[in-house]
């Protein structure tokens, strides 16, 4: 049985409680915005692996108090992107080859479930499916524009949005949350791959073919094509690790 909570605006205690609840929501939202800001800087190597960053400096740059910045930093530390060093500052963690391999395996397995489910449920007569189709096409248009201009950061962001949209279509929020959480460690290498290989045309063609297979309700076919899509990218990782060895964990770190 659920009980509704009704606030009386004429009651000072209720007004204070409403204000506190609003503040809590705003603070959490602000911390998440800071999290996304810092996450992007880490993934796109604006913050280099091993670089020291400072809570006060970030707060000043963003014009914020230290509280949401601290909350965002602790979240990124829990996800192993940052390392908090007492009395010194915060260090951007070096990329862990082991973490990348593990995250890639999890991502590959779970995204296969999502793409399969998207293909199974796809129905052109469904208004929501038509909306998804328009959104996927818009993402591809933006990705093509980024590729034409060789804008690596924008291209990476639309690559993320493409895969996120399939996760949304799948409808399994738990699966989507896990994929997004582990994918960041793979993305640090994927961004370097985009930057180095510039194989943006290949990625776009892959996305076009994945959409076509989903629209045909070809569940097995889309999983095979997704595996090819992800494996092609991962085949470049060895060369990336060699070229950017300073970005990766060594035995002494």
Image (spheres, rainbow, N blue to C red):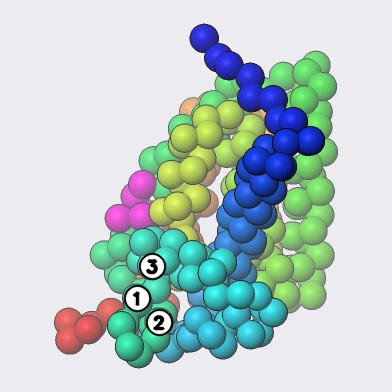
Q: Who's the residue at 75% across and 52% down the image?
A: 140
Q: What main secondary structure does the magenta stretch of the protein show? A: helix
Disc 1 to disc 3: CB gap under 8 Å? yes
Residue 7: image quadrant is top right
- Disc ID at residue 77: 3
- Looking at the image, do the residues carrying marks 3 and 2 touch, with CB atoms under 8 Å apart? yes
- How busy is the neighbourhood of tag 2: few (under 14 within 10 Å), some, or many (20 plus)? many
The residue under label 2 is 90
Q: Position of residue 92 (x, y in %)?
A: 41, 80
Whether the residues at callouts 2 and 1 have beta carbons within 8 Å, the answer is yes
* Residue 185 visible in the snapshot: no
Specify the segment rendered in magenta: 102-106
The one nearer the camera, 115 or 221, is 115
Q: Is residue 236 magenta?
A: no
Vertical order, 217 against 16 (above or below): above
Q: CA distance from mark 1 to mark 3?
A: 6 Å
- Give me the C-alpha separation between circle 2 and circle 1: 6 Å
Of residues 137 and 202, the one drawn nearer to the viewer in this rendering: 137
Disc nearer the start of the sequence (1/3): 3
Residue hosting label 1:
83
Q: Residue furthest left?
A: 251
Q: Position of 100 compared to 63: left or right?
A: left
- Residue 91 is marked as none
């Amino acid at each position: 049985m659920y009980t509704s909570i009704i606030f009386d605006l004429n009651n000072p205690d209720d007004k204070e409680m409403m204000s506190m609840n609003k503040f809590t929501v705003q603070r959490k939202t602000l911390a998440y915005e800071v999290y996304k800001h810092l996450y992007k800087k880490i993934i796109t190597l604006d913050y280099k692996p091993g670089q020291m960053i400072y809570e006060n400096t970030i707060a000043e740059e963003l014009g914020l108090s230290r509280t949401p910045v601290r909350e965002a930093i602790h979240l990124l530390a829990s996800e192993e992107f940052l390392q908090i060093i007492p009395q010194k500052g915060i260090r951007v963690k070096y990329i862990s080859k082991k973490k990348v391999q593990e995250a890639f395996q999890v991502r590959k397995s779970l995204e296969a479930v999502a793409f399969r489910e998207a293909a199974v449920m796809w129905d052109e007569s469904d208004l929501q499916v038509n909306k998804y189709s328009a959104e996927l096409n818009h993402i591809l248009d933006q990705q093509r524009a980024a590729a034409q201009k060789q804008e690596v950061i924008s291209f990476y962001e639309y690559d993320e949005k493409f895969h996120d949209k399939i996760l949304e279509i799948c409808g399994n929020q738990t699966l989507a949350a896990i994929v997004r959480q582990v994918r960041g460690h793979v993305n640090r290498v994927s961004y370097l791959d985009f930057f180095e290989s510039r194989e943006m045309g290949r990625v776009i063609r892959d996305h076009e073919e994945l959409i076509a297979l989903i629209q045909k309700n070809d569940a097995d076919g889309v999983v095979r094509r997704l595996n090819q899509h992800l494996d092609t990218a991962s085949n470049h990782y060895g060369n990336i690790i060699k070229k950017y060895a300073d970005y990766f964990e060594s035995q002494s770190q």
